[in-house]
Amino acid sequence: MTKILVVDDEIDVCDFVRSFFEERNFQVFTALNGSEGLRIFKREKPHIVLLDVRMKEMDGIETLRKMKGVNKKAKVIMVTAIEDQDKMDTARKIGALEYITKPLVLENLESIVMSYAKEGKNA
Amino acid sequence: MHRDLIKNKIDHKGWFKIQQWMLDKLTDTEGALIPMGAENVQKWPKAEKDYQVFLENASRLMIRFKKPEHLIKMIVNIIDEQLGITHTAVLLYKEDKNAFILIDSKGEGGTKIPVGFIRMTFENPLIKMFDERKNYVLSENGVLVSEEIAALLKNKESLEKHKDLAGLIELVLRQMDILKANMCIPLYYKKGLIGILVLGDKISKQKFTRQEIGFFMTLANDASMAIANAQLIQSLQERIEEIKELYNKEHRVFMHTAIALATAIDARDPYTHGHTERVTGYCLAAASELEGIPEALAYKNFKETLHISALLHDVGKIGIPDAILSKKTRLTKKEYVKIKEHPAIGAAILTPIKELGSVAREIRYHQERYDGKGYPEGLKGGQIPLIARIIAVCDAFDAITTNRSYRHRQMTDAAIQEIQASSGTQFDPIVVSAFLLAYEKGKILNSNKK
């Protein structure tokens, strides 16, 4: 089963995305902040991480940097608000695969995650 | 108390109160609703009446919301609190994003779609179906119910009837599955789709009855009207703000042009340097003591007309030769006649500018005297417009207190006495008393005094 980790400080987002991907046969882990996300990341070694950019304390960029420090090959997809587009260059440089802009089209989220999930299985 | 609440104008701060009131109203014994699929089926007729009450209350309140978002929050809230449905959400079309955005949602964790998290473009099958009105092919009332669509897909015979739609129907069902929607109701206004009401399952797991679907359709219709109304008000308000800003900008440019022109006039006469600026200041100070009087109120915009008139009162001096204007010795009779032309020249310069029609008149008469001995026409008392009468006093005061080519500066107090002495002859007594009042309050400041 493909493991996906969702890091977002909004509990509604975590719950919704969890239920969304569980229905698509993923094993879903959620974290409400960067440090919790990092802990789960180290423990569970998820195939894919969905990482919110705007979070209190440790933001998405910082979390991404730390995850990449733990595992250079980590597959991280950033989820961002339109206002944070400038941060995406930084995220790409650190090694984020992709970013999705909120409000997002659910099919996009699904197809992006699915394509990386497949890739992960082949590897 | 409830009636008072309705009567009062409700602004966006008040919406929460209204919502609370509505919830109270709906949960009290009179207006309470039985959650959908309540076990006691015998109670349905009563419930039907209650839905009527619910709808009446809801539509009456809806039209009072000025912000579409607040209105939607109220609708979502009352559905969620009253009707026993797993989750409720409303998507609304946003022009700037050219997509449908989830405005509010309520319900059980995991089923509830997070606010602001998703958007649906016109490519979305559900939006496409509603936007192109294909939903009416599938259901008479345009409401999409997932079980009905699923049943349709299983029925080869009816699927044959909608051959061209089969692909889209499948995608719509998938879409409803993604949203965990049992029922999707389009919100139309005039010809366009403005939003979608998304409803989950009944907590009782029962099917929605025809009656309930009808209820939601009515609610959706009323909501569409109210949302469109609120959107219209909002866009009008934005437009008004834009126009206001545009006007302010233009107005600033205009005032600065007037000031520049006034400065140019002043520059020609070194002995009266700063004259226009001072006179304008005195005029505004004196006028603030006259603001409420009927003659001032008769002006379309008293303060502004006064401001511009004061700035431009000497614009006619452009037509007077330098030799006369800056002459240090006493003027000859002929030269004095020439000088006296400046109010008429000023008015003639400004008359072609339609917007400055009233200003031209004030400038023409600022050298008239209250007793009729002034120029150019020898108008008397109330025949002279008020602003011209104010400029006359302030102009004279500055002439007395400033070193002019033909007069030495006097002490300010002596100048005040001189003005007072001419009250009722040269000057309008009402304007003089307003001027003195302003002087006593320290508002008449002679910046030229050394």
Image (cartoon, rainbow, N blue to C red):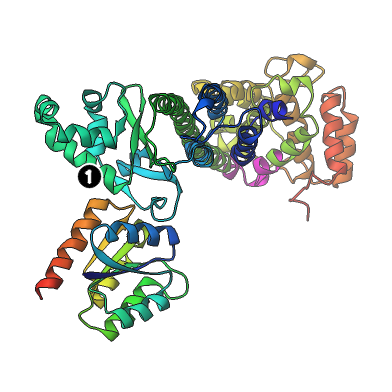
Q: Is residue B333 left or right of residue B249?
A: right
What span is in magenta?
Answer: B265-279
Task: Please report the residue visible at 87 percent of the width from the left and 27 percent of the height from the top.
Answer: B423
User: Where in the figure is residue B228, as x and y percent of width and height?
Assistant: 43, 28
Q: Residue furthest bottom?
A: A70
The quarter of the rendered structure image containing the N terminus of chain B is top right
Quarter of the image holding residue B120?
Answer: top left
The quarter of the rendered structure image containing the C terminus of chain B is bottom right
User: Where in the figure is residue B330, as x and y percent of width and height?
Assistant: 72, 36
Task: Name the amino acid type tagged 1.
Answer: Arg
In the rendered image, residue B50 lying in the magenta stretch gets the answer no
In the rendered image, residue B270 lying in the magenta stretch gets the answer yes
Quarter of the image holding residue B430?
Answer: top right
Looking at this view, is B278 or A109 the one in front? A109
Looking at this view, is A13 or B416 the one in front? A13
Task: Please report the residue visible at 76 percent of the width from the left and 29 percent of the height from the top.
Answer: B291
